[in-house]
Amino acid sequence: MRTGGILCLLVVAGLALGCGASRPASSVVPPTRPDVPVAHLAIANRNEQRLAALWAARYGKHAEFPIGPGDVLQISVPGLDELKQRTVRVTEDGDISLPLLGDIHVAGLSEDGVRRQLVSRLRNYMYHPQVDLFVKTFNSRQAGVLGEVRNPAMYTLNGPADTIREMIQRAGGITDRGAQEILFTPSESTTMRKAAETGSPGQASVRQAAFAVPEGLSTAANTAEKNSEPRTGITPTDALSYHDGTVAPLVIDLAPDSHDERYLEMPVMPGDTIYVPRAGQVTVVGWVYYPKVIAITPGLTVLGAVSAAGGPLYAGNMTSVKVIRQGAYGQPTVFTVNLNRVKERAAPDIPVRANDVVEVGYSTLRLPGYAVYYALQGVFMWAPAAMVTQGIP
């Protein structure tokens, strides 16, 4: 009975070898960039154009942050009892209210600009007025650093020179579960949305170049964006504008083969949001010792994922490891990686992404040897037990 099972394994291996010899080589051709599906390069290009436009609008322009809603001002006018050590909060409409002076619109003004406004009104009550102005709390100068950082919170900006990199460092850095990308929502998107709601075209003109649809973007790409269904989480190839007109986050790709790292030096403005998504998981299946789902850690590659699954079995084909990657709107992209060349440093390894499936196939040349090895292993495991049961010393 046992001998018959061994013969069956050898016959199956022989058939597999014969079928594999006539099977044509895989026709799957990896795209130029495996991490960006070719069918949606237009969307990736749009993201890059928006990043470049926002960079040009912000980088090197270190203007003083204006006063904004929520800021708390301490104002004192020597010689005027009604205005000694007055603490006021800027309303949502951008106004402050003071005795004698009434309501004053201060949002958008610098500290010096607010001081000049106060001096102008005080001339109705005194000669050569002097105003002491101090901003106690800069609530309007906050930016959110959220997601997979060690201390997610709203942080007050120290000044216009604060960058995305510095704000992430203030939040304790990215955790081990963080993805190799950052979703950056600039405050301009909120400004444009509010302007659209109020019908104020003047406010909507603030850095619109960073959010304009570039010329040449195909109608098919636009249609695909509008018809896309929202999925859990946000990925680099998701639509870049939502149905309500708000602007989707800009994606800063931190993968080793990306050139987006320079955007970490982007100056952060009040109202910006920096979000680090969770890296997700990768599934390793096929001819490995321990097929499993693996949590993605920073720097995890296809070779690292296969190694974490115990490595390939004897018959595993490391020259053509298949990676199935979910692209935009669910369309899969399939490409192969020669891990033997990767180990020899003759080819680059590929970082894995969330929801990747890494499949290690079998080698038709090694399969018969694997069958023999498996059969002999069964014989050696069965023989001692048989000898004991039959009383053989």
Image (spheres, rainbow, N blue to C red):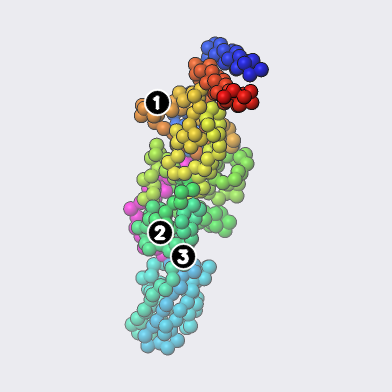
Q: Give neighbour class at mark 1: few <14, some 14-19, many 20+ (Cα, 10 Å).
A: some
Closer to viewer: mark 1 or mark 2: 1
**Residue located 43% across and 28% down the image:** 339
Is residue 274 visible to the viewer in this orientation of the structure? no
Magenta residues span: 46-66
- Of marks 2 and 3, the one in the foreground: 2
Name the residue beneath numbered marker 1. Answer: 341
User: How far across and down, in percent of the image, does residue 25 sit?
Assistant: 51, 16
Question: Picture quarter containing residue 119?
Answer: bottom left
Q: Please give left or right for residue 96 compared with residue 346 in the image.
A: right
The Cα atoms of the two marked residues, 3 and 1, are separated by 54 Å
Examine the structure image and report whether residue 51 is included in the region drawn in magenta: yes
Mark carried by residue 203: none
Residue 154 point in image, percent of width and height: 48, 61
Earlier-in-chain disc, 3 versus 1: 3
Three-letter code, disc 3: Ser
Nearer-the-camera pick, 8 or 210? 8
The label shown at residue 140 is: 3
Rendered residue at 46%/65% (across/down): 140
Q: Give the mark nearest the N terminus, 1 or 2.
A: 2
Q: Nearer the viewer, residue 317 or 139?
A: 317
Report, in whole angstroms, how far the alpha carbon at label 2 lies from the one at label 3: 18 Å
How far across and down, in percent of the image, does residue 165 sit?
A: 38, 52
Label 3: how many residues lie within 10 Å, few (<14), some (14-19) or many (20+)? many
